[in-house]
Image (tube, rainbow, N blue to C red):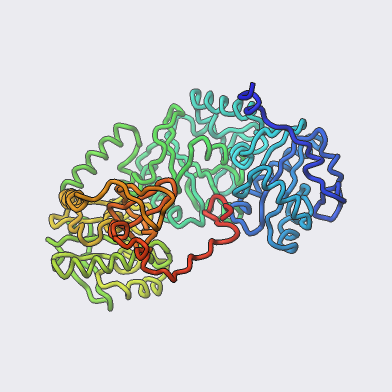
Amino acid sequence: MADAEATTPKSHDLQALLSSDGRDFLVRNNGDQVKTSELTGKTVGLYFSASWCGPCRRFTPKLIETYNDLHPKNTDHFEVVFLSADRDQDSFNEYFSKMPWLAVPFSDEETRDRLDALFEVNGIPHLVIVDPSGKVVSEEGVGVVGDYGVDGYPFTEERIKELKDEEERARRDQSLRSLLVSTSRDFLISSDGTQVPVASLEGKIVGLYFSASAYGPCVDFAKKLVEVHGELNKRGESFQVVLVSLDSDEDSFKETLEGMPWLALPFNDKTCSKLLRYFELSALPTLVIIGQDGKTLHPNVAELVEEYGAQAYPFTPEKVAELEEIEKARKEAQTLESILVSGDRDFVIRNGGSKVLVSELVGKNILLYFSAHWCPPCRAFLPKLIEAYHEIKAKDDGFEVIFISSDRTQEAFDEFFSSMPWLALPFGDERKKSLSRTFNVSGIPTVIAIGANGKTVTDEAREILMTHGAKAYPFTAERLKEIEEEIEEMAKGWPEELKSALHDEHELHLTRRRTYVCDGCNDQGTGLSFYCGECDFDLHPNCALLKDEGTANGDADHEEEAPNEGWVCDGNVCTKA
């Protein structure tokens, strides 16, 4: 019985929850007061949000769209109540002015805090769905509305299961029509606005091109795709592209489509969000290939198109396997010149602009350093790399680093490169794109180690440098194995566990740790730590093994930094710090 009670959702009296002493009403953005009793019998979304929260601002228009679609049809059935985490009345007023629903008055901070605590709101946007009986049917309203919109109503587990079952059936019976036709539309549009029946694409290989016009990689990829599309059509191939735009305004959408040789789903068409979820989109640009039978041939051939162009057509498993063999042979034949020389671009530069021929670097151990001035992790990593560079260079002149910039301006490139003691590709050099594709660089900073023979040693040189520094040179598996053996030899005779005056709550256990910050001296450590997993507490071995543990901290006068107050945003959610 106890287990059953624990899993039974608790029912709430919304009228009592949303009222306070002296207030039994909610407000609209025009100042009108609405009695909380008017929520009786309705499904209610409690929307925890704030104007300063980027993820909230991105989600609110989707919730408004869903609300407006539902409200004319279900005026007596669905309502949203805004619970603000804004910092002042003006911010609340400005944000709430765009919302068509109700709110707890900004002045009633006590009620808002009480509901935050009741529903354990640790991140925003957060949408709690409460059914007419007062039962919480979903605490994942943001995801449900984001995925299904109005189709998810009344947002219960049963309704979401129905929708997922429908999607599963659609996957089994997938066709071009099931993907692109909706109840209100059976056509696509061309760049001049002409309506083209979806049926006219049946029997063709179709690329669903997911793109956002303001995103640089999409802009670059579109140029390549136009070239490939044109070449294939000249050859008489039955290939068509359909743009699935993620643009947020119609002018950007029209500008993107204008002059393009392909078709598109209409702007803001509900099928766009359905396809995002259906294909579990995780990157832009994405080019999904649908075969002549309407089934998915490949979930994303964007990289294949970038690397091989029209040669990748028709994107079948057999063609992909053929290209993989080509890539394998290319890697086996890789030399420094094959990856760094392109046409007459056979040089890199020093600070000041003087050229160094790639041929002069052949036979050296090279680090390709993908980075940018605007990237905080890159700036944080740079001193570590400079330190390792000087240490390695002092022992082996047959070592070099080449900076490959993702900076947006020549000025930013020049400023960042001026702090570096090594070489670089010139700013805006086209070789950067091919190198990024060759080494699948999806984030920065990234460091690729190239051996003296021109072959790739590792694509994890950044992580190795962070862990072992210059002593990991030349970053080979053999050298890393030697380091592990050195660590094991060094640790012989050390206790497996010990007590420390710096952490007398629990024993510390000798633990292999990739990187950590010592809670004794505040310096970074690698390899081994005396560690408390329960408290996430680390001590360098030299700090932990000092006889006078009371002095291990080394900075007794150091005052601990005060914790951040407020919220921290990571791009998807804002979380209480």
Q: Residue at x 16, y 46 (%)?
A: 332
User: Which is nearer the eye, 51 or 249?
Assistant: 51
* Quarter of the image where one finds residue 544: bottom left
Q: Is residue 315 left or right of residue 34?
A: left
- Quadrant of the frame with the C terminus: bottom right
Name the residue rendered at 55%, 34% in the picture.
Answer: 180
Q: Looking at this view, is 158 or 526 the one in front? A: 526
Where residue 502 appears, as percent x and y from the top left, is 40, 58
Q: Position of residue 280 (x, y in %)?
A: 48, 38
In this orientation, does residue 334 appear?
A: no
Tell which of 448 and 513 is nearer to you.
Answer: 513
Quarter of image, res 526: bottom left
Is 58 or 270 nearer to us in this picture?
58
Q: Indicate the quadrant containing the N terminus: top left, top right, bottom left or bottom right.
A: top right
Give the residue furthest to the top. 1
Which residue is outermost to the front? 548
Examine the rendering and report whether any part of residue 45 can be seen.
yes
Q: Which residue is most to the bottom?
A: 352
Q: Residue at x 38, y 37 (%)?
A: 237
Residue 87 position, x and y percent, is: 68, 61
| Rendered view: 178 above or below 35 | above
Residue 277 lies, with reference to residue 331, above or below; the image says above
Task: Give the quadrant of residue 161.
Answer: top right
The answer to whether residue 280 is above or below residue 431 is above
**Numbered marks: total:** 0
Image location of residue 336, percent across then percent down: 18, 58
127 relative to 313 in the view: left or right: right
